[in-house]
Amino acid sequence: MRIRDNSPPPAEFQLAPMIDIVFLLLIFFLVTYQITEQEKDTRVSVPTSSEGSQEARVANEIVVNLTADGEITISGEVYTKDELRQKLERIVEASNLANAGGGDQQPVRIRADGTGQNQQLFEVMDEITKAGIWNIRFAKRSPK
């Protein structure tokens, strides 16, 4: 008579699923890195502030870069003030259709150059509010 061994087989490390997970993580980090790099403009030197907190980024946040000479860019594309307002109005309109009236809560972060003129910054803020957006934040750096 044969005696059967009822113990479970030894546990093995499954390599194929681990490779799949590593590749998915690699793709995820590459894609998110490219998105954040598109939003940065190296010509903008954001002012420093020791007070306040740097709030976490929101997924659908629009980053508006304002250089010292008054150039407005979003994701590397240059806009005039009127073009900026029209673009944001279209975004608010699409958001209102999708969220049933939540377009005014569209987050916008302004990365203004610290050496720029305040008048240009206030003009950009005016265009953003004319487009119907009230959720405006400012980018800052912590002092070293």
Image (spheres, rainbow, N blue to C red):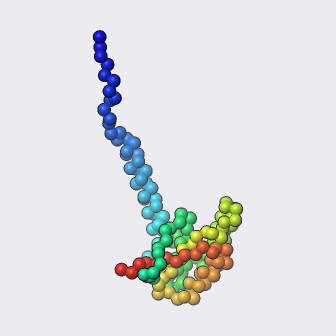
Q: Residue 100's spot in the image, x, y percent? A: 70, 62
Q: Residue 23's spot in the image, x, y percent? A: 40, 50
Q: Residue at the spot x=53%, y=63% of the render?
A: 59
| Quarter of the figure with the C terminus | bottom left
Q: Is residue 33 above or below residue 55?
A: above
Q: Residue 47's spot in the image, x, y percent? A: 45, 82
| Quarter of the figure with the N terminus | top left
Residue 141 vs residue 121, the one in the foreground? 141
Residue 76 vs residue 60, the one in the foreground? 60
Q: Is residue 45 visible?
A: no
Location of residue 94 by image quarter? bottom right
Q: Is residue 50 visible?
A: yes
Q: Residue at the spot x=39%, y=42% of the render?
A: 17
Q: Is residue 16 above or below residue 103?
A: above
Residue 80 vs residue 131, the one in the foreground? 131
Residue 25 vs residue 134, the one in the foreground? 134
User: Is 44 on the left or on the right of 103, as rendered?
Assistant: left
User: Is 10 on the left or on the right of 57, as rendered?
Assistant: left
User: Is 69 on the left or on the right of 23, as rendered?
Assistant: right
Q: Residue at the spot x=66%, y=66% of the render?
A: 102
Location of residue 14 by image quarter? top left
Q: Residue at the spot x=29%, y=14% of the render?
A: 2
